[in-house]
Amino acid sequence: MFQIPQKRNKNKEHDIKEAFFYMDLGLEDKVVLVTGANNGMGLAISKAFLDEGAKVAGGDLSGEHLKDLEPADSIYPIIADLSTKEGTEKLVQECVDHFGKIDILVNNVGIANYKSSFLDLTDDDWNRTLQTNLYAMIRTSRAALPHLKKQSHSAIISIGSESGHVPDEFAIDYSVSKAGVINLTSALAHEFGNDGIRVNCVSPGPTRTNMWEQPGGMIDMLAEKFSMDGEDAVKHFAANVRQIPRGEIGKPDEIAQTVLFLASEKASYVNGAEFAVNGGSVRYH
């Protein structure tokens, strides 16, 4: 068992207690490419890698929140529309041009389109969700793999979802896209494992991100569905619908810590795996 401090400054001595609990994940100076990095889970993942001494290229439609991260010379925001082929290729090329390599790819970018029924989803809705959630993983991985192959040890970690196994009727397109992410993880792990590239997937349960908090997001949808105040609806959903043992949804930082482990050499024999980080909300095999 190990404990990762929330903040780590390699330029300062740790006290004895912190040094005792800290396990070095060996991520210092690794170059990490994170998609959907400007908010929520992607921002938490970017911060976590920076705290480990890694260098992070973060791709998103905006770099507003990334530009304030520290240390400034280790974070490189890249503005790109990752729902397009051109955007994903630009992201990978700019990362390599700036940092010289890619050691770790985190396919995180995703959107959710909340509708009351499958019949309410148009072809445009399906296309937008699949292009962002699944095709971004396909295209970014395809563009990054030649660079990952150049490293002796490299990794791809993609963000799936428990919805990839147990679909939500209010986000069918999202659920289908995440099932694709989980399936593609297994395929890539099998094909590229012999190249020293480990490919794994983290499937969060309900996690408080901007997809939940934005207008028209999950909190608003639950409030309408259950005829409750937003926060009361979230508590009801966590405790009574998802039946999460601790009675609350997850936090982005909790997902980020699992991503760190899978990116590190501490997970050197983990390949083609899906890690369910859902607080026990869905039990599947």
Image (spheres, rainbow, N blue to C red):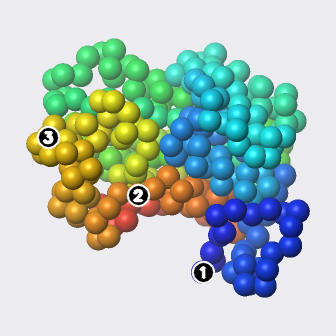
Name the residue beneath numbered marker 1: 1
Q: How many marks?
A: 3
Which badge, 3 or 2, comes first in the chain's sequence? 3
Which residue is rendered at x = 80% and y = 46% of the image? 71
Closest to the observer: 128 or 227? 227
Which residue is rendered at x = 62% and y = 35% of the image? 65
Mark 1 → mark 2, Cα distance in angstroms: 21 Å
Q: Amino acid at mark 3?
A: Lys
Mark 3 → mark 2, Cα distance in angstroms: 21 Å
- Residue 215 point in image, percent of width and height: 33, 30
Q: Callout 1: 10 Å neighbours few (<14), some, many (20+)?
A: few
Q: Element at badge 1?
A: loop
Q: Amino acid at mark 1?
A: Met
- Residue 105 point in image, percent of width and height: 67, 43
User: Does residue 117 appear left or right of residue 146 in this picture?
Assistant: left
Name the residue beneath numbered marker 2: 250
Q: Is residue 85 at all visible to an observer of this figure?
A: yes
Q: Callout 3: 10 Å neighbours few (<14), some, many (20+)?
A: few
User: Does residue 119 appear left or right of residue 55 in this picture?
Assistant: left
- Residue 170 point in image, percent of width and height: 22, 36
Looking at the rendered image, the disc whose residue lies closer to the viewer, 1 or 2, is: 2
Name the residue beneath numbered marker 3: 225
Determine which quarter of the picture holds residue 111: top left
Which badge, 3 or 1, comes first in the chain's sequence? 1
Residues at circles 3 and 1 in contact by the CB criterion of under 8 Å: no
